[in-house]
Amino acid sequence: MEACYNNIPWVIIIVFILVIIIIPCAVGGKVPAIIVFGDSTVDSGNNNQILTIVKSNFEPYGRDFYDKKPTGRFSNGRIPTDLMSEAFGLRPFVPAYLDPMYNISDFALGVCFASAGSGWDTTTNQLANVMPLWKQVENFKEYQKKLETYVGANKSNYIIQEALYVVSTGTNDFLNNYYSPTSTRALHYTIEQFQGFLIGLIENFIKQIYQLGARKISFTGLPPMGCVPMERAVDLIQGRGDTCIEKYNDVALHFNDMLSGLVHKLNGELPGLRMVFANPYDALLQMIKDPSSFGFEVTGIACCGTGLFEASYLCNKLQPLTCPDADKFVFWDSFHPTQKTNQILVNSMMKNVLNQFL
């Protein structure tokens, strides 16, 4: 009997190890890191470190972020990938790969390679001198080497294969490239041809990161881009009224259909790939059409400045008209949503498509 009692502490220790260490490894932590590619919708500060005019590392950007600090995120607070990281039980933000404040110990839990102003078409990236997707992939390769050195080959392979890859870009290819008055693409491509051209580039990119180990991918569709304040303001000035530009919205809808088809195709072709299509179109349009249901008051203009044209350097602390409460606005600047809008979008994505990775 005494021998049995003497064994009790060891039994407790074994149970403790099972509960605290082994079981969480088996049932939790399905996404050990968030790895991000894209444009200003998900750039957490990479553009701060490159020579470009597309920046937001100054006030009033970031006024609702931690310590009220402008970080290079194009919002008053957090961006979608920050909120996704938190939803997966990771840190409440994803650091930028080029940010000197962080190192590989930080990036092991998530890293952002995105560059504001970028797009699929090389012409889009050249317009603002930002990091193209191929450069973002080169940085990813460099990251993989650093990660292996830091955590070892086995854990590095686990992180790379089990991480959630978020890809969010495309709007710039249309609004800042194809539909720009100075665009040459519109001279050589019909809009349908241009969409097909982009789909080919996207397919190559997905196959490239797949070859580098990506297996869980969230691909973000286009928003109702005809409803961003900048485009509505141009329409208003040209005397067509303050409404969404339906031509642009129709293009976004059609392109999203093509993206959805591509996601389905690649899931069938690439063994082990689990790619989901995270489409923000309907959720964002709902907020714009029925703002009061979400606690918003203003949709046609943004919070910063006049709310019509201000973005990047035009959205600065010298603007006397910037709103005091961004939570009442769907858009923070003339192109980008507020933190509140981002949170609603992420909540919808987590519920409808990203829940399979929890």
Image (tube, rainbow, N blue to C red):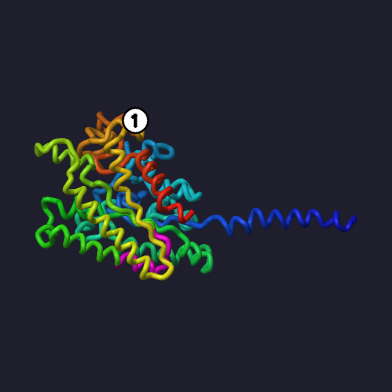
Q: Is residue 43 above or below residue 296?
A: below
Which residue is painted at 85% across and 54% down in the image? Answer: 5
Say left or right for 203 vs 147. left
Report helix, strand or loop for mark 1. Answer: loop
Residues rendered magenta in the picture: 204-217
Q: Residue at x 25, y 46 (%)?
A: 224
Q: In the rendered structure, which amino acid carries the disc numbered 1?
A: Asp
- Residue lying at 35% horizontally and 65% vertically, measured from the top left: 138
Q: How many marks?
A: 1
Q: Is residue 105 left or right of residue 234?
A: right
As drawn, which residue projects farthest toward the right?
1
The residue that mark 1 highlights is 325
Taking depth in this image into account, of 158 and 151 the one nearest to the observer is 158
Residue 316 seen: no
The image quadrant that residue 304 belongs to is: top left
| Quadrant showing the N terminus | bottom right
Residue 107 at x, y = what percent? Answer: 45, 56
Q: Nearer the viewer, residue 183 or 320?
A: 183
Asked whether residue 238 appears in the rendered view, the answer is: yes
Does the stretch in magenta take in 216?
yes
Q: Is residue 146 magenta?
A: no
- Name the spot of residue 252 as percent of width and height, x first: 23, 52
Residue 47 drawn at (x, y percent): 31, 51
Q: In which image quadrant can residue 207 be found?
A: bottom left
Q: Residue at x 32, y 36 (%)?
A: 60
Q: Residue 44, image x and y in percent? A: 37, 49
